[in-house]
Image (cartoon, grey):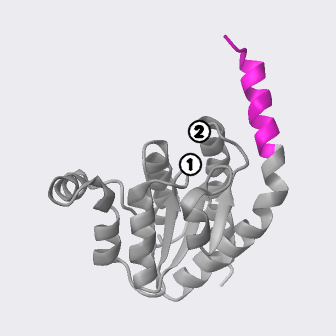
Amino acid sequence: MRSFTQIVDEHNQVLSASVESLEQPFQTAANLCIRALENKGKLLICGNGGSASDAQHFAAELVGRFERERNGWPAIALTTDTSIITALGNDYGFEHCFSRQVAALGAAGDILIAMSTSGNSENILRATGAARELDMKVIGFTGQGGGALAPLVDALFAVPAKRTARIQEVHEICLHALAEAIEENLMQQ
């Protein structure tokens, strides 16, 4: 069994390797989100497994608050309505559980935040396609290389790691950084 120290060391190595490569995607993603929210757009967020939880957490930071008292901003985690997800999975297939929601809820000027540690989840790729059909911008969160999602997004947080746990840990830091940037910029206006 690896020690806690070894696991944290691995985390720190991945985080250190990520910092420089994620600065430009962070700046682009923050500006896209800020612009969308300034123009009365909304953020739609999706992911599977742990990324589904990250989608919900990020939406909560924006609808509720991150660190400062303020009005909420429109952010919807497409992972929360079990009736919609199970109906779409049953009637159309799980690969459509997010794309149908994007088609129903999204509009030009909105942002899709699509999370897949492999970058190859079919339901995430289809959601991205649905967003593009609506002229939405897309921010991707993946692991090393970005998978099939990489060429489909406007900003890509591709964490240089293959282990899902390490990828998701860095994604969480990126999402908190985005929440902070959005809150600071929109509250100055």
Q: Quadrant of the C terminus?
A: bottom right
Q: Residues within 10 Å of mark 1 (few under 14, many from 20)?
A: many
| Foreground pick, 81 / 181 | 81
Q: Earlier in the sequence, mark 1 or mark 2?
A: 1
Q: Quadrant of residue 19?
A: bottom right
Q: Based on the picture, tell me whether residue 166 belongs to the magenta stretch.
A: no
Residue type, numbered disc 1: Thr
Residue contact at pointers 1 and 2, CB within 8 angstroms: yes
Q: Which residues, given as a range, are shown in magenta?
A: 1-15
Measuring from the top left, give residue 169's x and y in whole percent.
Answer: 64, 42
Image location (x, y in percent) of residue 54:
50, 50
Q: Label 1 vs label 2: CA separation?
A: 6 Å
Seen at 47% across and 60% down, the residue is 59
- The picture places residue 106, in percent across and down from the top left corner, at 37, 78
Q: Which residue is mark 2?
A: 164
Residue 7 vs residue 144, the one in the foreground: 144
Q: Nearer the viewer, residue 112 or 178?
A: 112
Q: Secondary structure at mark 1?
A: loop
Q: Which residue is mark 1?
A: 117
- Near mark 2 (Cα within 10 A), the count class, few <14, some 14-19 or many ≥20, is some
Q: Amino acid at mark 2?
A: Thr
